[in-house]
Image: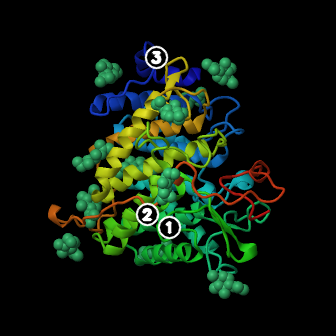
Amino acid sequence: MISLLGIYTPLFAFVLHVHSIVLDVNDQQSIINASALLAHGVQELYNGNETGGVPGKWPYPPYYWWESGGAWGGMMQYWHFTHDDSYLNVMMDALLSQLGPNYDFILQQEAFDTGNDDQAFWVFVAMAAAEYNFPDPPSPVPPWWIVAQNAWNDYAARWNTASCGGGLKWQFYPANAGYFYKNSISNGAFFQLSARLARYTANQTYIDWANKIWNWVEDIGLMSPTYDVYDGTDEKINCSNVDHHQWTYNVGVFLYGAATLSNYTNNSQIWVERTAGLLAATDTFFTPFTNATDIMFEAVCELDNSCNVDQWSMKAYLTRWLANTSILAPYTAGRIGTLLRASALGAAAACTSGVYGNTCGSKWYVNGFNNITGLGQQLSALEAVTALLVNDTIPPRTQPQVTILVPPPDALPITTIAPTSNPNATANPLHDSPPNGVSKKDAIGYGGLLVGLAHLLI
Ligand SMILES: *[C@@H]1O[C@H](CO)[C@@H](O)[C@H](O)[C@H]1NC(C)=O
Ligand SMILES: *[C@@H]1O[C@H](CO)[C@@H](O)[C@H](O)[C@H]1NC(C)=O
Ligand SMILES: *[C@@H]1O[C@H](CO)[C@@H](O)[C@H](O)[C@H]1NC(C)=O
Ligand SMILES: *[C@@H]1O[C@H](CO)[C@@H](O)[C@H](O)[C@H]1NC(C)=O
Ligand SMILES: *[C@@H]1O[C@H](CO)[C@@H](O)[C@H](O)[C@H]1NC(C)=O
Ligand SMILES: *[C@@H]1O[C@H](CO)[C@@H](O)[C@H](O)[C@H]1NC(C)=O
Ligand SMILES: *[C@@H]1O[C@H](CO)[C@@H](O)[C@H](O)[C@H]1NC(C)=O
Ligand SMILES: *[C@@H]1O[C@H](CO)[C@@H](O)[C@H](O)[C@H]1NC(C)=O
Ligand SMILES: *[C@@H]1O[C@H](CO)[C@@H](O)[C@H](O)[C@H]1NC(C)=O
Ligand SMILES: *[C@@H]1O[C@H](CO)[C@@H](O)[C@H](O)[C@H]1NC(C)=O
Ligand SMILES: *[C@@H]1O[C@H](CO)[C@@H](O)[C@H](O)[C@H]1NC(C)=O
C-alpha cells in the first residue's frame, strides 16, 4: 500500500502514533477522526490502482465483485458524512471502470459472479452519488441517476412471471448456480431502488413497481406478517416453501426502501407502519447477550464464526440503511440512534490491530479484537462509526421539481416500535433443518453473492 500512504501523507502522520481506534460518540471530531482511520483501513486493502490489481476491485479472490461495490458504497457514505475529499479521485476512477458499456454495471468479465443483487451493490453507489451530489461523471457517461435508471430498466425487464407469480431470480445468467432461486436481497434491492428513484424523480412508474415488488415478496412469504425477512425461495417448487435464514442486509434493504416511501408519501400510514415494523424486526440482530445490549451481530453465523467472506460485510449494509432510515423517517431516529451508538462503540473496540491500530476483528460484542479480519470487517466498522454523523448531514437530494413535505413536529407519527421476534430466538433465528446429505458448506460453494442459500436449489 505504498502508493496509498504516499497519497494520504497527512493522515499517515496522524495515525503513526495511534494504536487503536479512540471513539467518543458524543464528540463530532472524535467520530470524524475514527472514521478517517477506518476509511484508510478499507483503502489499505485496495489494490485496484497498483500493478496486478484491477481498477475498481478489491483483490479476487477472496473478494467477489459485488463486495467492491459494497465497499465503494461505504466510501461514498464516508465522503458524504465527513466531506473528506482524499479518496474522491480513486472513487471516481473505480466507479467509471466498472460501469460497463451500457452504463449499468454489467460487465462481461464479471458474468460469472453477477447476479441481480451483485449488480445492485454497485447501483446503490450510483444512486447515492446522485442523491448526495457527488461530482458527475465525465462525458459521454450520463449522470449518476441515469446510471441507476439504466440498471432499474434491466431489473424491470428481468421481472419473471414464468413461475411464482413474479419476482426477480437471484441469477439472470442461466449458467450461474442459483438461476432458479428467487431471493430477498435481489428483490429488496429492486424495491429500494424503485423507492429511491420514486423519491428522486417523482415518476409514478417507480411507485407502482415498489408496490408490486413489495406485494409479491409478502404474498410469496419472503416477508412474514411481523416483517421478518427470509433468504429466498425456489422456482422449481413454484416458491411454495422458503429458506428461513435471516440476514442483516435483507431486513435492512427493505427498511430503507420503506422509509424512503414513508418520506415521499408524507408519512402515509401504510409506509409508516411498514417502516416501524421492519425496524422492530431488526431486533433479531441486536443484543446477542445481555452484556451487549443494542450491539449488532450477524445472527446466523457470527456466534460460531461460520460467516464467510461475503457475510462478514453485511453488518455494514444494515448499519448504512438504519442511518439513512433515521433521516428520512424521523420517528425512528431515537431507537436507531441508540442502536448505532452501542454498535459503533463495539465496532471501534474491535479495531486494535495492524500498524496503525485500525485493523478490525469481526465481532462487536466482545469488546476487543478477535483476529478474524478482512474487507467486510473493515467496511462494517467504517460504516458503524461514520453512521454516527448522520444527524450532521444534509438529506438526500431530489430533482428540482420534486417536493418533499416536512410535517409540523406535532404531526410526526407516533409509533410504538415493539420487538416482534421471540426474544429467546434472537441469537438463533429460524433455520430450516439441514438438507439430507447436503452440508451448508457444499451449498455455499458457488460464485457470486452467496449468502444463506441452503438446500432449496440443490
Ligand atoms: C482529531 O485529529 C486531529 C489531527 O488530525 C487532532 O489534532 C485532534 O486532536 C483529534 N481530535 C480528537 C477529538 O480526537
Ligand atoms: C445513505 O447511504 C449512502 C451510501 O449508500 C450514503 O452516501 C449516504 O450518506 C447515506 N445517507 C444518509 C442520509 O444517511
Ligand atoms: C491511484 O489513484 C490515485 C487517484 O486516482 C492516483 O492519483 C494515483 O496516481 C494512483 N496510483 C497509481 C499507482 O496508479
Ligand atoms: C405458482 O405460484 C403462483 C403464486 O403463488 C400462483 O399464482 C400460481 O397459480 C402457481 N402455479 C402453479 C402451477 O401452481
Ligand atoms: C418514468 O420511468 C420509466 C422507467 O424508467 C420511464 O420509462 C418513463 O419514461 C419515465 N417517465 C417520465 C415522464 O420520465
Ligand atoms: C422527509 O425527510 C426530511 C429529511 O430528514 C425531513 O425533514 C422531513 O420531515 C421528512 N418528511 C416526512 C414526511 O417524513
Ligand atoms: C439523531 O437525532 C435524534 C433526534 O435528536 C436522536 O434521537 C438520535 O439519537 C440521533 N442519532 C444519532 C446517531 O446520534
Ligand atoms: C458477553 O458474553 C458473551 C457470552 O458469554 C461473551 O462471548 C462476550 O465476550 C461477552 N462480552 C463482553 C464485552 O464481556
Ligand atoms: C492472527 O491470525 C494470523 C493469521 O491466521 C496469525 O498469523 C496470528 O498469529 C494471529 N494473531 C494472534 C494475536 O492471534
Ligand atoms: C402532510 O402531512 C401533514 C401531517 O400529517 C399534514 O398536516 C399535511 O396536510 C400533509 N400535506 C399534504 C400535502 O398531504
Ligand atoms: C423464553 O425462555 C424463558 C426461559 O426458558 C421461558 O420462560 C419463556 O417462556 C420463553 N419465551 C418465549 C416467548 O418462548
Residue named by callout 3: 19
Image quadrant containing the N terminus = top right
Q: Outermost residue toward the right?
A: 437
> What residue appears at the point 32 percent right and 33 percent down from the top-left corner?
25
**Number of callouts in the render?**
3
Mark pair 3, 2: CA separation:
38 Å
Mark pair 3, 1: CA separation:
42 Å
**Mark 2 nearby-residue class (10 Å; few <14, some 14–19, many ≥20):** many
Earlier residue among tags 3 and 2: 3
Q: Name the foreground residue: 330 vs 300.
A: 300
Q: Name the foreground residue: 94 vs 284.
A: 284
> What residue appears at the point 56 percent right and 23 percent down from the top-left corner?
3
Three-letter code, disc 1: Phe
Residue named by callout 2: 257
> What residue appears at the point 77 percent right and 66 percent down from the top-left corner?
174
Three-letter code, disc 3: His
> What residue appears at the point 64 percent right and 38 percent down from the top-left corner?
305
Three-letter code, disc 2: Gly
**Mark 1 nearby-residue class (10 Å; few <14, some 14–19, many ≥20):** many
